[in-house]
Structure formats: structure tokens, C-alpha cells
Amino acid sequence: MNRRQVICTAILLALIGAILPLGLAFYIAWTRTVAQEQRDLEATAHSGLQHAQEVLAQIEDTLRYFQTLAVKPCSQEHIQQMRAATISTREVDEIGYFRNLALKCSSWGRIQERIELPAPDMVLGNGVELRLNTFPMASPNTRMIDIFYRSHNVLSDPVRFVDIELDSSMQIAVLTANGKLISSRHGPSPEVVQKVLSGVQPAMDREVLSVMARGQDFSVVVTEPRSKIVEKLRREQMLLLPMGLLLALIIVGLVVWFSRRRLSMVGELGIAIERKEFSVHYQPILELQTGRCIGAEALIRWRRPDGRMVRPDLFIAIAEEHKMISQITEQVFRIVIRELRDMLVADRDLHIAVNLSAQDMQNGRALKALHRMLAGTGIEPGQIWLEATERGFMDVDTARATIGTAREMGHAIAIDDFGTGYSSLSYLQQLPLDALKIDKSFVDTIGTDSATSSVTPHIIDMARSLNLLIVAEGIESEAQAQYLKDKGVHFGQGWLYAKAMPVGEFLSFYEVNLRESGAPFPQVLKEL
Ligand SMILES: Nc1nc2c(ncn2[C@@H]2O[C@@H]3COP(=O)(O)O[C@H]4[C@@H](O)[C@H](n5cnc6c(=O)[nH]c(N)nc65)O[C@@H]4COP(=O)(O)O[C@H]3[C@H]2O)c(=O)[nH]1
């Protein structure tokens, strides 16, 4: 992933991370509120049904009482009893006595006019008849529910059937079992009520919550516009939104932390070490006189997940600065042993040079790790050479100790990039080194009249006087190679011969080289 992709992904993830928990909190608050409201509606519908049935039962009791009352119909006493019942029974507003389906007297007294019972709207299982739109003589504008049994009827205010505790945001309708409206409160929509009754989910269920309770004689529908539950939703949100907000903050924080880590080279390097994103390429080292390949320098390669390569001189410095280099050195050792173990065991003339950083030289941890890794592999320690730059030898005492340990273990040790730092002859004399590598910058000056071109022969003379093996790196031309050969430089590496290459290519190169050069293993190395 490149920088831009990391930033875009981070922004996207941060947005999702912020929106998702908040959206989730909102969604949970909404569904919890709706579910709670649905439960409240159900409870209201059931209590509405129970109440309507109790009202009916009360009226039926009154009717049954008059059925068994042994008084002369429409006598003073009969009318008196009817009046008493309207006073003592809340559900009973008026009582009437019928003969041949015509009203003879009521709790108001005797009736002179002929009032006949119309056809009932519904007949209950016990023979009680219901008429839903009765307008009594005493108050002709008031609709009453007429409940008739055998010879008596009761007129009851429809409100009695819905007289329950009702939330101001809810609407209730009590209907007969065959769906005719008895009474309602808070004006429920007749269409919604009919749809709920018929079992069809109301089309506007996005706007209305509804519940139905069905009894033997009545059905009760309770509705509530969703807009009315906003207040309750807010209360729920007050509870959940802070949690969502906290989660969003945590996610956004994590995204920022991860992306910053990903964006910084140090962070990326740490991830690369964890994920073992490194590989090793091998640059052949040849004896200059014969052209025989005696081994290779192991050079680390880091390919990032997006496919881009990072130059080692860039990330090695950062790894050193942030104390990550030892892990990298260990990974290089591990890769070299894994990739070349068989070949190193089969061919004792093959040598691989591995770079040690200044820190590796100072803390000696890499050497211990190498010792552990080589145990039981069959590889001779002498087949692994170690190279360290001048900086690695700055602290002469520590350097001497580390070189001593390395040599005791059987490794040859070389000073890399010689001449680029402050090393002097006297300084070199104090270190028990095996080889000196001439830096490419000096090889580049061969045949030129640059100011440093005169340094190269001095470095070579110095190395020779200290009896060190000399390896020149960065040889790119025949002229450079010839010059170095003439000066008695033993070994060289550079694009003139081969670039650093993956293990498979190197092994082929090595086999072809051995076949074609036909030269024996160099005497100078046997003496090491
Ligand atoms: N232009 C040109 N370049 C040539 C030629 N011949 C060799 N080179 C390059 O010169 C560098 C030689 O390695 P170095 O001096 O140890 O310099 C190395 C070394 O200091 C460091 N390095 C590489 N691998 C490791 C490692 O495993 N551990 C440590 N600590 N440092 C490493 O990174 C530096 C750069 O490594 P590379 O990029 O692989 O670059 C390599 C190599 O590819 C040539 O003819 N022409």
C-alpha cells in the first residue's frame, strides 16, 4: 500500500469507525424503543380487551337480574328498580323493558310512543344482542350502545368500553368480533384499524405501530404514530449514544495510531520485521586473477506489501537508529542458512559474507544468535564471513573483543567500506581482522584524475602491509578490474561480474562459474 492509499484507507476506516458505532447506537436505541413501545401497546390492548369484557359482563349481570325479577312489568316498582340500577351501576346509563320488540317502559318511566328494536349489529354466543348506533329519546344526539337480552335492554355510553388508562400518544378502538366499531379514543385511523383487523400489516407501518388483541366478543386495536416515540427514543439515545461515541473515539484513535505507524518508516520497519518481509540477494565474489567465484555477499532486500523495494542503505540506517538492526541481522542469518544450507554443506569452498551493523559489533548479540543457528546445520562457521563497516570498529576495545569472539567461533571478519570513515593504519593495526573491503567510491576513481584516486593505492598498500585479504567492491569496468589485479587485490565483486541476485540464480551462476573457470580454490583462503 502506498502513502496515498494508506491515507485514503485510514480516512475511510476512520469515517466508518466513527459512523458505524454511532449508527449502531442509534439503530439499537431505535429498535429497543420500538420493541418497548410494541410491548406497551400489547399491554394496553390486552387491558383494553379485558376492560371491555368486564363492562359487558357487568351489563349482562344487570340484564340477567331484571330477567329474574318477579315484579309486574312497567309497574312503579319495576321502574324504580330500573332507575336504581342506572344509579348504582356505572356501566348502565339507561334500562328499558320490551314486549313484542317494542319499548314499553324504561328507567325514565312509561313510554307512550311506539319504539321498536331494529335488527341487531351482532348477536353474542349467549343470545345477547348488540346495537351499536342507538340514539335515546332523552338525548337524541348521543350515540349509545344498546345491549339487549330477552325482554330488557341497557343503554351504555360507548366511552365506558374504552375507559382505561391510555397514553396520550396512543389510540384505541374497541370493536365487535365481526369488526364493527363500538368505541374509540384519541381518534385512531379507521383504515389502519381495518387493516390491522384484517391481519394485513398496515401499509403505513413505517409511520404507525399497531397491535391487536382478540377476545370472544371483542377485538381491540391500539395504534401509535412512530413520530410520537421520538421522545422516548431520545431518552434511550442518551443512554446508548455516549457508549457509541466512546467506541467511535476508540476506533478512530486506533485507526490514527495504525496509520501513523504504517506511514512512518520506523513503524513500517517494525511491521516488516514482525511479518518477515525481507529476502536476501547474493552478489558473487570472485578471485580477480582466475575469475573463480568463491562465494557471495548476502545483501538484504525489503519489498513492501505494495511491491515497492526499499533500498537497504535507507532502512538499515533507520533500523540502527531505532535499535531494530539486531532483529534484521538475525533474519538475514536465518534466511542465508535456510536457503544455502545444503549447498554450504555439500561444497566447503562456498563462502557467504554477511553484514554486521555497528550495534551488532557492540552488543555481540548477533554472534550469539549465529552460533545458535549454525548448531547442528553441518555448516562450517568458517564458511560464514562477517563484514562490518568502520563505524562498527569505532570503540576499539569492544570491537577487538567481538572480532576475537567471531574468530574463535571460526568466522573470518572483514572491515567494510574501508576509507570512507576515519580509520588509519595505526587503528587498523590494533584489530585482528582477516580482510579489508575497498569501498566502491575508491574503485570508481580508478583511471580518473579525481582527488581521491591516489588514495586507492595507499589503501591497498596498507592492507597488504597488514597481511589482510583485499576485496574490492563495485567493480564495473575491465579497466578497474585490471588495475586491481595488477595491484595484487585478491577478490572483487561488482556489476562487471554480476549483480546481487536471488538464491536460485546465484547457485546457477556459481555452478557455471566453477565449470567454466576451472580454477582451484584460492591458496590465500586455505590459509585463513
Ligand atoms: N552501482 C553499483 N553498486 C554495486 C556494484 N556492486 C555492488 N553494488 C552494491 O553495493 C552495495 C555493496 O554492499 P555494501 O557496501 O555492504 O553496502 C550495503 C550495506 O552497507 C547495507 N546492507 C545491505 N545488506 C545488509 C545487511 O544484511 N545487513 C546490514 N547491516 N547492512 C546491509 O546496505 C548497503 C547497500 O546495499 P545494496 O543496496 O545491496 O548495495 C550493495 C550492492 O548491490 C556495482 O558494480 N555498481
Image: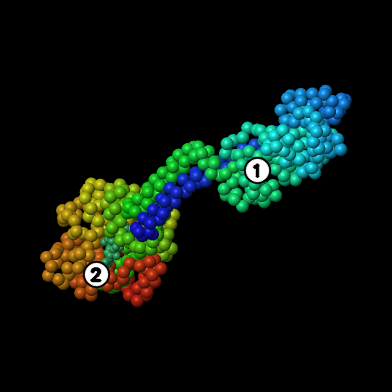
Q: Which is nearer the eye, 351 or 164?
A: 164
Q: Quadrant where the N terminus lies?
A: bottom left
Question: Looking at the rendering, which quadrant does residue 126 occupy?
Answer: top right
Q: Quadrant where the C terminus lies?
A: bottom left
- Where disc 1 sits, the SS reads strand
Say which residue appears at 43% left-offset and 48% top-offset. 18
Say which residue appears at 79% left-offset and 23% top-offset. 80
Residue linked to disc 2: 475
Instruction: Answer few, some or many: residues within 10 Å of disc 2's Cα (few below 14, many 20 plus, some between 14 and 19).
Output: many
Residue linked to disc 1: 211
- Where disc 2 sits, the SS reads loop
Residue 422 seen from this side: yes
Depth check, mark 1 against mark 2: the one in front is 1
Residue 295 position in % (x across, y down): 33, 65
Question: Looking at the rendering, which quadrant does residue 161 occupy?
Answer: top right
Residue 460 position in % (x across, y down): 18, 64
Say which residue appears at 29% left-offset and 53% top-offset. 318
| Mark 1 CB lies closer than 8 A to ligand 1 | no
Residue 29 position in % (x across, y down): 52, 42
> Which amino acid, by three-letter code, is at mark 2?
Ile
Residue 383 seen from this side: no
Residue 363 position in % (x across, y down): 30, 47
Instruction: Answer few, some or many: residues within 10 Å of disc 1's Cα (few below 14, many 20 plus, some between 14 and 19).
Output: many
| Mark 2 CB lies closer than 8 A to ligand 1 | yes
Ligand number 1: quarter of image? bottom left
Instruction: In the rendered view, tell whether residue 143 sits above or below residue 196.
Output: above
> Which amino acid, by three-letter code, is at mark 1?
Val
